[in-house]
Image (spheres, grey):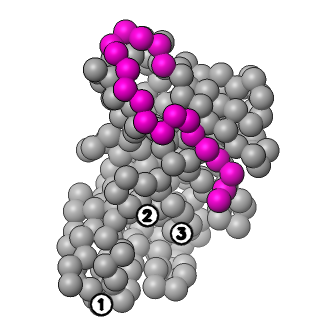
Amino acid sequence: GQNIDQPTEMTATEGAIVQINCTYQTSGFNGLFWYQQHAGEAPTFLSYNVLDGLEEKGRFSSFLSRSKGYSYLLLKELQMKDSASYLCAVRGFQKLVFGTGTRLLVSP
Amino acid sequence: DAGITQSPRHKVTETGTPVTLRCHQTENHRYMYWYRQDPGHGLRLIHYSYGVKDTDKGEVSDGYSVSRSKTEDFLLTLESATSSQTSVYFCAIKGEPNLGDGYTFGSGTRLTVV
């Protein structure tokens, strides 16, 4: 089976940097994904890691350590529009399993 | 737009009635998925399909059935709706290789069972 843990809620200030952690235990691993979901909307793809290390994409970066079962999503230069839920998901065989998500609140 | 649409967007139904949700894609993707999303549980897989007439169960499949008679359509049926099936339902297709084959989601169907 698979178990994915991430914090329920985080708060941060506009312009700051925030790191959202995700730990996982899985019987099979074919990649880790991060999705962003604004309230009332569908999740949208942010990043994908299959090898250890850091993947950078603009203000967002994602890190993976397969040996530790650990990933984080780093958001820089926070903007108000970054207030959303961030979902960590692990791909096993043919399907993605999601964590419960981290709700990020960005304040002025 | 990833070419995936869900219908209806909102539905209110009574306990015990059958309900069918539709997911339609225009991109000829082989894999399609149905998830439900509830507070405190995140997205949970109900059923998925890996081709026409090829489907399999996810982690929360009890009370649900699916059908895929055409590549473009994946139907989710609640045989006899219960209040515990009040949820937001998302359909997804497997995305592009440059996205790691991650999923693209439809806009969701908000279902209320009263």
Amino acid tagged 1: Gly
The quadrant in which residue A41 appears is bottom left
Calculate the distance from the C-alpha at mark 1 to the C-alpha at mark 3: 21 Å
- Can you give x and y, in whole percent of width and height, for residue A106 in the image? 25, 76
Calculate the distance from the C-alpha at mark 2 to the C-alpha at mark 1: 18 Å
Marks 3/2 in contact by CB < 8 Å: the verdict is no
Sequence-wise first label, 2 or 1: 1
Assess whether residue B2 is covered by the magenta stretch: yes
Assess whether residue B67 is covered by the magenta stretch: no
> Which quadrant does the C terminus of chain B fall into?
top left
Marks 2/1 in contact by CB < 8 Å: the verdict is no
Task: Name the residue beneath numbered marker 1.
Answer: A15
Tell me if residue A23 comes above or below residue A12 in the rendering: above
Q: What is the crowding at mark 3: few (fewer than 14 residues within 10 Å), some, or many (at least 20)?
A: many
Mark 3 falls within which chain?
Answer: A
Marks 1/3 in contact by CB < 8 Å: the verdict is no
Q: Please tell me whether mark 1 or mark 3 is closer to you in this view.
A: 1
Look at 59% across and 22% down and name the residue there: B66
Which circle marks residue A47 in the picture?
3
Tell me if residue B100 comes above or below residue B61 in the rendering: below
Amino acid tagged 2: Gln
Q: Is residue A23 visible?
A: no
Look at 34% across and 83% down and name the residue there: A79
